[in-house]
Image: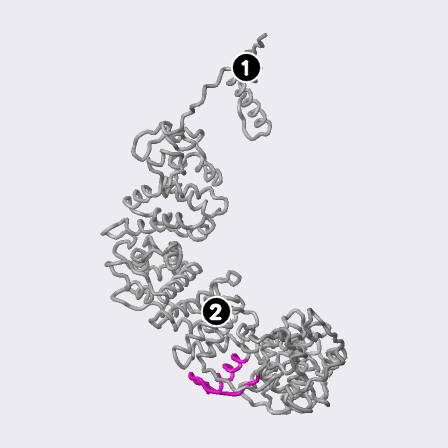
Amino acid sequence: MEVRELEGKEKLVEVLQLVDALAKDVKSNKLQSSRLIEILQQLRVHGRNPLNADAIYSREGIRILAHYGFEGRSPAISREALRCLANALLLEKDMRQIFVDLGHGPDVAEKLKEENSDDEFLASRLLFLSTYDSSYPPMTLTWISINYLRTMLWVKASITCNLVYLVYHSNCHFVIAPRRLAHESYFSEHPSLSPHPLAPPDFRFSISHFYTKWKFANSKGKFVYLPANHTCILPVTEKLVEVLQLVDALAKDVKSNKLQSSRTFFRYLSLCTLDMEMQIPSLTLFSVPRAGLIEILQQLRVHGRNPLNADAIYSREGIRILAHYGFEGRSPAISREALRCLANALLLEKDMRQIFVDLGHGPDVAEKLKEENSDDEFLASRLLFLSTYDSSYPPMTLTWISINYLRTMLWVKASITYEPIHIYRHSKRFSKAKKKKLDKMDELALSETLKLMFNITNFYPHRGDTFSISIPHILKILSRIEIPTPPLQAPVNYLINSLLNLDLEAKKSKHFGTNPLFPKFDQNCNVDKMINILDQAVAMHKPEHLETLAVPLLTLLRKIYSFAPEGPRKYMEWLLLPEDDDHDLPIGQSNTLSSRLLRLSTSPVAPSLREGISALMFELSGSDATDFVRNVGYGFAAGFLMSHDMPVPETAKEAFSSNTSRGGELNPNVNPITGQRWDAEPRDTGPEMSQEEKEREAERLFVLFERLRATGVVDVENRVRTALEQGRFEELE
């Protein structure tokens, strides 16, 4: 059939119509074979130029062509579709990654079984193009399912083959190459060595024109074969092979459903060194215990703790398989093992988070939150949290969770109001009798739930009211939990963080009769616990750690102070602002909480901490600059006030002379700069200066002030110059 080449809009419309016809036939299966072949031939002609052929050069176009290429009703249909695919991958490198992501590696490998040149050519070209572009890492070939492809390609005798994996024991490199090229190169460099026992004496290969130049590389005594452009090297270690075998076993079981939980015995291909001198391993059959699903998943979890050489896990296909067992596992034990592997993958490789999102498992994870046990709570909350954590993704990635659905899963009706089931379940463990330390699993689960709550309320502030019903349960846990050492660690820091975005003032929520922050039996109990945690944290944590750990607590205290009743406000001022005893030494030099906070407010390694402490002290001083200076001294106050463009009292003394202290009395006996009482300052016990010494010292000061005035930093009056200008200066003989 002769196909007329089209251009411009006419071509664009025709290509769209042809692809649409194929897309409809994928479901209906009504087109005749002859018509299908005609459509594919037309698409092949139009696809020779990507311009105005967007329907082919798209994810949907590649998917449809792959469907007919690997599931065609006849070899002719299959080959026409694969020719279209090969052209698309050749002309547009972006299509190669799409083809990889669609997971058709095993289908291409299956094509290599066909003993005819057409299928050999098309399958080899597709595999080659998927590894050719240097912008993709060499490990893109892992999706082919190495176990499967290796079985297809290894030969035991003089049987023809296309590609082989040559395995070299020095850090085990698999090199994809025509076997003759590799062996001829190797043995030409080592004429004393005999050929490999498995090298067939007679074979053919059809893709050698892809590899026009090969070279032998000797690096630190380790022999590997490299193609000149380094595009097809597949580095292999023992771990990589085992991970591939494990994932391959899971992939097969997804369809066959034959793996048992208990161990059995089976035979499998493994690496075994045949010649220690040559260090060329081969594939050998071993009879070993066959792990059940749980054992396989446990091994994958161990291997997945380091992404290096665990590419089969850290791939779209690996995430898909693990999610299958995580959400459709035959037992809770299998499901949890798979979810642990998933959680590790999402934690260690942020790219896996987007893959997990794209696979659409949000509702499955939300469903897991219905389970009232800490194992499922921990895993489900962690997966949801990690899917929202990376800042390179927009916050709206959470939309796939379906917030309404997630909310329905999280809350259950108890009495008249809704209560968050997991936080409520944890809070019931704490009685008034004694402080309690959570079990490790309960602690991890609570921490993940609190982290998830913070992220959701951070990205969706309007949802804060929905979660505000958990406030009394969070406060109950916080007030009764045993404070760890050091204090700002899980779950205490997550309890504090989770409160930040909730409706603490109860402006919108109507869940409570009285504000749970200030219970009637003791309005100060929650504030006291938070300040106690702050006190211990300042004493135990280093400033650089407090930079991230303590700022949320300081922010929470500021937020609470802004709407607290009179009693708790006075209580916070009493605990956090310097008291009379602090004035026995210069402010900030005693060992009280306020002094330690003031010392941290000048820490050079913690700018956020400095800002948080100074802002808290300023607000505790009624957000008044004069009171602020009076409370903490001019030295600690000046920097904060100037950085926020606030008017600083004209003189330090003004703060102490124009306002009353917290006791209601004037306090003129305090040094306005240091904050220390005058009578407590150390006395100068040395001899008094003579008149001449005083004059020399005054002259030095005049010179210094003149220099400062010249720089424009300060504008001071030199009284000597003024007297001279006014004619009041008399020179004595």
Residue 260 sits inside the magenta stretch: yes
> Looking at this view, is 256 or 49 the one in front?
256
- In the image, residue 28 above or below residue 360: below
Q: Which mark is residue 708?
A: none
Q: Which residue is mark 2?
A: 344
Secondary element at image label 1: helix
Secondary element at image label 2: helix
Sequence-wise first label, 2 or 1: 2
Q: Amino acid at mark 1?
A: Ala
- In the image, residue 111 above or below residue 596: below
Q: Which residue is pictured at 52% across the width and 79% down the height?
A: 247
Q: Position of residue 9 (x, y in %)?
A: 67, 74
> Looking at this view, is 507 or 666 the one in front?
666
Is residue 334 visible to us here? yes
- How packed mark 2 is, by other alpha carbons closer than 10 Å (few <14, some 14-19, many 20 or more), is some
User: Which contiguous range is marked in magenta?
Assistant: 245-269
Q: Please indicate whether residue 339 sits to the left or right of residue 127 in the image.
A: left
Q: Amino acid at mark 2?
A: Asn
Q: CA distance from mark 2 to mark 1?
A: 79 Å
Q: Position of residue 485 (x, y in %)?
A: 37, 55
Q: Which mark is residue 723?
A: 1
- In the image, residue 552 above or below residue 177: above
- How packed mark 1 is, by other alpha carbons closer than 10 Å (few <14, some 14-19, many 20 or more), is few
Colour setting: one colour
